[in-house]
């Protein structure tokens, strides 16, 4: 029996979402219950998910989620990596307006078992928690790539948090039994050069990822494994070190909107990653995704 995972993603903007999905599709202990997409043009993001699942020969339910944030103006309206979809088979039509219901039904069908892995803005999850009473309590845990807890150069607000701070605030104030957050201050320690990534990212579903990455490399020369690190913590949590306490979100208008504020407290239900064993992470990631391609 695997670990039941529900993935919420804004695949198609940064390439790391696809890198994370490839890991989940390859992991022998991952029971991927479904994928919901979030942020601008969620239908195009769903096409990318479907293309990867087809190439991996894994039938996975995919739903288009919400495109606009709960309150703030949209900041992520384009999905540049969909240009690569011409190379791959994929569905073009997905259930409309049913993502939140699907998430609720999936969690309620496995009370206390489901891990919700969020690697995009928290719009879908915030609306879910607002509209379905006690649904947060029925999860096993949330694991998210979001926020900045320690030092991260000059960055004070992480992109997923900035895109929908009010939804993130709802999630952090919820009664979810366990919330794990890995932020930019930690994920920036797991980075790979363009040349190294191209050399590694070959075979099966990784070929789809590589095609998305080519569009990413038009303007960048590295891949940072933000989202794959969050995914790995579902299965190998000791790759990171943590502090335990409570995360709060700044929601007032201004430059710090979306800032993640952490208060350490013994026995708290929130834990934030503070360090990562980068060598061990990369070894685990590539061992997992390459198993079926060797």
Image: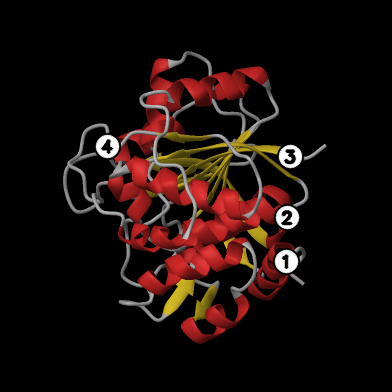
Vertical relation: 111 (above or below) 210: above
Task: Say which label, 3 or 1, has the lower sequence index.
Answer: 3
**Residue sitting at the far top:** 133
Whether residue 257 sits left or right of residue 122 in the image: it is left
**Colour scheme of the picture:** secondary structure
| Residue 28 visible in image | yes
Q: CA distance from mark 2 to mark 4?
A: 31 Å
Vertical relation: 156 (above or below) 33: below
Contact between marks 2 and 1 (CB within 8 A): the answer is yes
Contact between marks 3 and 2 (CB within 8 A): the answer is no
Quadrant of the frame with the C terminus: bottom right
Which numbered mark, 2 or 4, is in the foreground of this view?
4
Residue depicted at 78% across the width and 40% down the height: 2
Task: Say which label, 3 or 2, has the lower sequence index.
Answer: 3
When asked about the image quadrant of residue 126, the answer is top left
Residue depicted at 32% across the width and 56% down the height: 157
Circle 2 residues within 10 Å: few <14, some 14–19, many ≥20 = few
Label disc, if present, on residue 215 of the rendered structure: none
Rendered location of residue 261, percent (x, y): 40, 47
Label disc, if present, on residue 284 of the rendered structure: 1
For mark 2, what is the residue? 236
Vertical relation: 238 (above or below) 60: below
Rendered location of residue 227, percent (x, y): 52, 57
Whether residue 49 sits left or right of residue 281 in the image: it is left
For mark 3, what is the residue? 3
Residue depicted at 42% across the width and 33% down the height: 94
Task: Say which label, 3 or 4, has the lower sequence index.
Answer: 3
Residue depicted at 59% across the width and 73% down the height: 201
Q: Secondary structure at mark 3?
A: strand
Q: 86 or 171: nearer the eye?
A: 86
């Amino acid at each position: 029996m695997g670990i039941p995972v529900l993935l919420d993603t804004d695949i198609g903007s940064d390439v790391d979402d696809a890198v994370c999905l490839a890991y989940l599709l390859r992991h022998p202990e991952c029971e991927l219950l479904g994928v919901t997409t979030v942020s601008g043009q969620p239908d195009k993001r769903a096409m990318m998910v479907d293309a990867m699942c087809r190439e991996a020969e894994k039938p996975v339910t995919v739903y288009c989620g919400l495109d606009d944030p709960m309150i703030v103006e949209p900041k992520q309206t384009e999905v540049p990596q969909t240009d690569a979809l011409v190379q791959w088979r994929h569905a073009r039509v997905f259930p409309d307006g049913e993502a939140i219901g699907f998430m609720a039904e999936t969690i309620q069908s496995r009370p206390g078992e489901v891990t919700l892995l969020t690697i995009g803005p928290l719009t879908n999850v915030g609306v879910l928690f607002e509209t379905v009473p006690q649904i947060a309590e029925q999860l096993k845990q949330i694991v998210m790539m979001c926020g900045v807890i320690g030092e991260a150069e000059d960055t004070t607000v992480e992109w997923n948090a900035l895109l929908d701070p009010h939804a993130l605030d709802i999630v952090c104030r919820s009664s979810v039994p366990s919330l794990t957050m890995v932020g930019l201050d930690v994920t920036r320690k797991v980075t790979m050069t363009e040349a190294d990534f191209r050399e590694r990212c070959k075979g099966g579903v990784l070929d789809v990822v590589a095609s998305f990455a080519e569009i990413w490399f038009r303007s960048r020369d590295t891949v940072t494994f933000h989202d794959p690190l969050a995914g790995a913590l579902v299965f190998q949590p000791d790759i990171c070190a943590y502090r335990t306490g409570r995360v709060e979100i700044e929601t007032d208008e201004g430059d710090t909107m979306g800032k993640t504020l952490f208060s350490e407290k013994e026995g708290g239900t929130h834990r934030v990653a503070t360090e990562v064993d980068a060598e061990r992470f990369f070894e685990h990631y590539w061992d997992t995704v390459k198993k079926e391609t060797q």
